[in-house]
Amino acid sequence: MIGAVGQVLGYGANYLVIWLLLQSFTTINGWGWTEIAFLYSLNLLTYAIGASFTYTPMVSLDQIIINGDFDKYLTKPLSPFMYFIANLFNIGYVAHILISLSVLLWSISHADISWTILKVIYLILVIISGSFLQASALIIIGSLSFKFLRVQYLFSIFFKIKEFIAYPISIYSIFLQIILTWIIPIAMINYYPSLYLFNNEILENQLFGIVALIIGPLSFYLSQKAWMRGVNKYQGAGG
């Protein structure tokens, strides 16, 4: 409970920093406080959902392998992947979900969006796809534990990269936008879905909005395959 309160205060401070920034600049490349609150909340909510299943298992995997504890996940008549992530599910992410969902609902009620049934369904699918995409990034890094063992630094790098999508990626250079869209496609989590919801009359926004729905499940499928490939090559703690 103390950890949950601390997380709420920590992310609450992040929202405050963004709000204070916008008190000075009013908008960031045309995005006001409501739109950026929506952008940030969508990122945090999808991370909380995806990471509640995958963060603890993947961050702990290198040490579990080194200690020889991973073998027990291979001795049950179950999928090693599903058994592993279910066994280490982290309920602590409920704090992330509460604060991000609260601000997301507030921003939805204040944003200039003409809501329709189609857009409501789209938002639900975006949250699902974004959660898959967040989870897949953690799984891919975790799967490298089977080869390199020590991969904690890669999680730190990922979280640093993820800070870029706290703001609209249009404020960055074209080179960085390409990286965040096609190479490390985390802009599909919140930026392109937000463009679709705010203005889906532009063809480009429609196309990227559709891609955002596909890339999450696809990335999760590929990451799960990569993880299982590592399992298939696993030869024990001394292998």
Image (cartoon, rainbow, N blue to C red):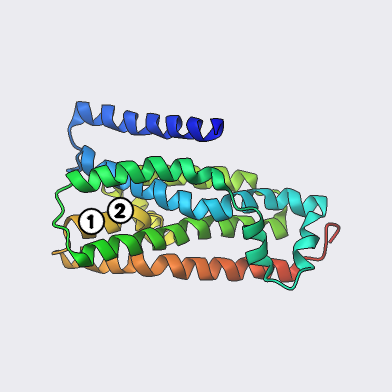
Q: Residues within 10 Å of mark 1 (few under 14, many from 20)?
A: many
Question: Which residue is painted at 53% across and 70% down in the image?
Answer: 222
State which quarter of the image contains the N terminus: top right
Judged from the image, the secondary structure of the residue bearing numbered disc 2 is helix
- Whether residue 143 is visible here, answered yes or no, is no
Q: Kindly identify the amino acid type of the residue bearing the numbered disc 1.
A: Leu
Residue at x 45% of width, y 46% of height? 161
Q: Nearer the viewer, residue 82 or 230?
A: 82
Kindly report the distance in space between the C-alpha atoms of the residues bearing marks 1 and 2. Answer: 6 Å
Q: Quadrant of residue 114?
A: bottom left
**Position of residue 102 in the picture relative to residue 152 (left or right):** left
Q: Which residue is mark 2?
A: 191
Q: Amino acid at mark 2?
A: Tyr
Along the line of sight, the residue nearer the viewer: 208 or 19: 19
Q: Residue at coordinates 43% horizontally, 65% vertically from top-left?
A: 216
Q: Position of residue 196 (x, y in %)?
A: 22, 60
Tell me the element at label 1.
helix
Instruction: Name above or below for residue 19 compared with residue 77.
Output: above
Task: Tell me: 8 left or right of 224.
Answer: left
